Image (cartoon, rainbow, N blue to C red):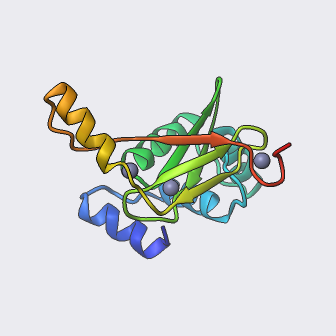
Amino acid sequence: MNIGLFRILFKEKKLSLSHPRLLIYQELSNAPSPLSPLEIYQSLLKKRKKIGLTSIYRSLDLFESLGIVFKIANGSAVKYKLCELESHHHHIVCKECGNVVELNFCDISDWSKKVAESTGYQVVDHQLNFFGYCKACKH
Ligand SMILES: [Zn+2]
Ligand SMILES: [Zn+2]
Ligand SMILES: [Zn+2]
């Protein structure tokens, strides 16, 4: 998601785009690979921008709920990747190096139908992650 869309999204949701939120967005947007909250904290500190770790966690939670970032949990370690795709999509995570690729297709309509039929629920949303080994890591 580019900075223009990022700003528009905050405006649409009537959320304030504070300076810390903008700085965190920039860190994620410049990072070649997913970042942990601590890595964001340390990187900002190096640029003489001191933002509390709690505030970083809260902002990342907000970004996640807005679909701006993808949260990768590996045991107790958590990293965040800025999503490039704006509409509904899925991710595949490398179990070795933690790299993430976004998948711009979603083909689970048959599965959704089965879920609806077997439970009587009206299905409105789903989340699905893939895990595996990337080209560089696979054996
Ligand atoms: Zn994504
Ligand atoms: Zn890998
Ligand atoms: Zn989907």
Q: Is residue 36 visible?
A: no
- Res 24 → quadrant: bottom right
Front one among 41 and 112: 112
| Percent coordinates x, y for residue 15 in the rendering | 30, 55
Q: Please give the name of the residue rendered at 70% of the width and 50% of the height, measured from the top-left corner.
A: 99
| Percent coordinates x, y for residue 3 in the rendering | 48, 72
Front one among 135 and 109: 109
The outermost residue toward the bottom is: 4
Query: Is residue 138 positioned above or below 47 on the image?
Result: above
Q: Please give the name of the residue rendered at 39% of the width and 54% of the height, measured from the top-left corner.
A: 107
Front one among 5 and 53: 5
Query: Is residue 89 positioned above or below 115 on the image?
Result: below
Q: Please give the name of the residue rendered at 33% of the width and 57% of the height, measured from the top-left corner.
A: 16
| Percent coordinates x, y for residue 29 in the rendering | 61, 63
Q: Is residue 34 visible?
A: yes
Query: Is residue 44 positioned above or below 76 on the image?
Result: below
Which quadrant is the C terminus positioned in?
top right
9 horizontally vs 64: left or right: left
| Percent coordinates x, y for residue 33 in the rendering | 71, 54
11 horizontally vs 5: left or right: left
Query: Is residue 131 positioned above or below 92 on the image?
Result: above
Give the number of callouts.
Answer: 0
